[in-house]
Amino acid sequence: MIRVSVLGAGGRMGTEVVRALKDAQDMQTALLLGPDDDPAAINPSNTDVAVDFTSPDAVLGNTLALIGQGVHTVIGTTGWTKERLDQVRQALDGHPGLSVFIAPNFAISAVLADRFAAMAARYFESAEVVELHHPDKVDAPSGTALGTASAIAEARRQAGMGPMPDATQQPDPSRGRVVDGVHVHAVRLRGLNAHEEILMGNPGEQLTIRADSFERVSFMPGVLLAVRRAGSIPGLTVGLDHYLF
Ligand SMILES: NC(=O)C1=CN([C@@H]2O[C@H](COP(=O)(O)OP(=O)(O)OC[C@H]3O[C@@H](n4cnc5c(N)ncnc54)[C@H](O)[C@@H]3O)[C@@H](O)[C@H]2O)C=CC1
Ligand SMILES: O=C(O)C1=N[C@H](C(=O)O)C[C@H](O)C1
């Protein structure tokens, strides 16, 4: 049995993870932590893998604490930057064999949409990303959209493509956040869960790639896969694609 502790266990995703763990034959829940609990309560004597679905403010501190405790960690929480990821890598240097796995999105639809976008990017002059979420989400744009934009930008760079056409004369918030040259727009709307649309255009044609997570259960197969694979790739790994393709 894999003993799994959950940080953010009382939240929207945490609640769903706890439910999924109960249904998984090869896993058992260990500690369930909320915002007032000390992540250092989690250690190898009670936990094989810790899962974090907390908040962008809390996740780095939790991760460093869990590395210090020598516990493999699976993270769905957003709010990662290059600098924060570097801090995690540095902390892991002192813990050979330990793994930290971060996925901006655990849903297969979103992971595939990302991959398709990267494949298609070199064939289109223009690309923009629109992410649409429930209005209780605290961060914008979504971690998924930031990753998608970077993947598109990287594919365009590799193909030797220049900037996208855009005659807008003054920078304006209505054009969204520019991530690595790719415009990212965020919609917050009651009734939505987690959705992303990638728009690509050429003269006379358009490709739209869309992923919809209607319910949080869509993330659970990915979370359980990452828990089962914890420790299989030592160090820091970002993206469920590492386990899928
Ligand atoms: N990677 C993925 O597939 C997905 C990622 N997310 C991300 O997961 C994160 C959580 O999302 P939700 O569950 O919707 O948020 P939420 O606000 O419903 O839940 C977060 C929970 O964490 C708790 N918390 C805050 N700080 C804590 C700390 N230091 N220690 C322990 N618990 C703490 C809060 O009290 C709350 O119960 C967000 O960053 C969101 O973007 C959400 C859905 C899917
Ligand atoms: O907060 C959410 O709900 C989600 N957050 C993640 C993100 O920011 O990309 C993943 C998914 O979009 C749901």
Image (cartoon, rainbow, N blue to C red):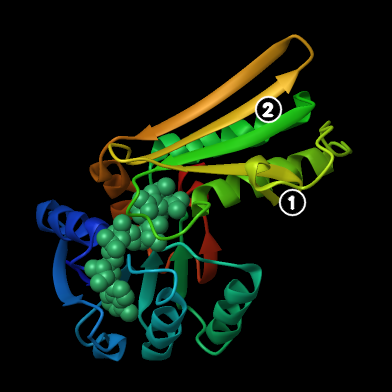
As drawn, the label of residue 164 is: none
Which three-letter amino acid code belongs to the residue tagged 2? Ala
Residue highlighted by disc 1: 180
- Can residue 142 be seen in the rendering of this structure? yes
Density class for disc 1 (Cα within 10 Å; few <14, some 14-19, many ≥20) is: few
Which three-letter amino acid code belongs to the residue tagged 1? Asp
Residue 4 is drawn in which quadrant? bottom left
| Cα–Cα span, label 2 and label 1 | 17 Å
Residue at the image point whose x is 69% and y is 51% from the top: 179
Q: Residue 13 appears at what percent x and percent y?
A: 26, 57
Q: Residue 84 appears at what percent x and percent y?
A: 58, 75
Image label count: 2
Q: Which residue is more in the foreground, 217 or 28? A: 217
Q: Is residue 22 above or below residue 174?
A: below
Residue highlighted by disc 2: 120
Instruction: Give the quadrant of the N terminus.
Output: bottom left
Q: Is residue 25 left or right of 88 when viewed as pictured?
A: left
Q: Is residue 166 above or below residue 17?
A: above
Q: Which residue is more in the foreground, 76 or 234? A: 76
Q: Describe the element under mark 1 as helix, strand or loop.
A: loop
Residue at the image point whose x is 35% and y is 49% from the top: 135
**Quadrant in which ligand 1 is drawn:** bottom left
Residue at the image point whose x is 64% and y is 41% from the top: 174
Q: Residue furthest top?
A: 204
Residue at the image point whose x is 19% and y is 83% from the top: 46
Q: Residue 224 appears at what percent x and percent y?
A: 28, 54
Find out if the beta carbon at label 1 lies less than 8 Å from the nearest ligand 2 atom. no
Q: Which is more N-terminal, label 1 or label 2?
A: 2
Find out if the beta carbon at label 2 lies less than 8 Å from the nearest ligand 2 atom. no
Q: Describe the element under mark 2 as helix, strand or loop.
A: helix
Q: Residue 83 appears at what percent x and percent y?
A: 64, 75
Eye-nearest disc, 2 or 1 = 1
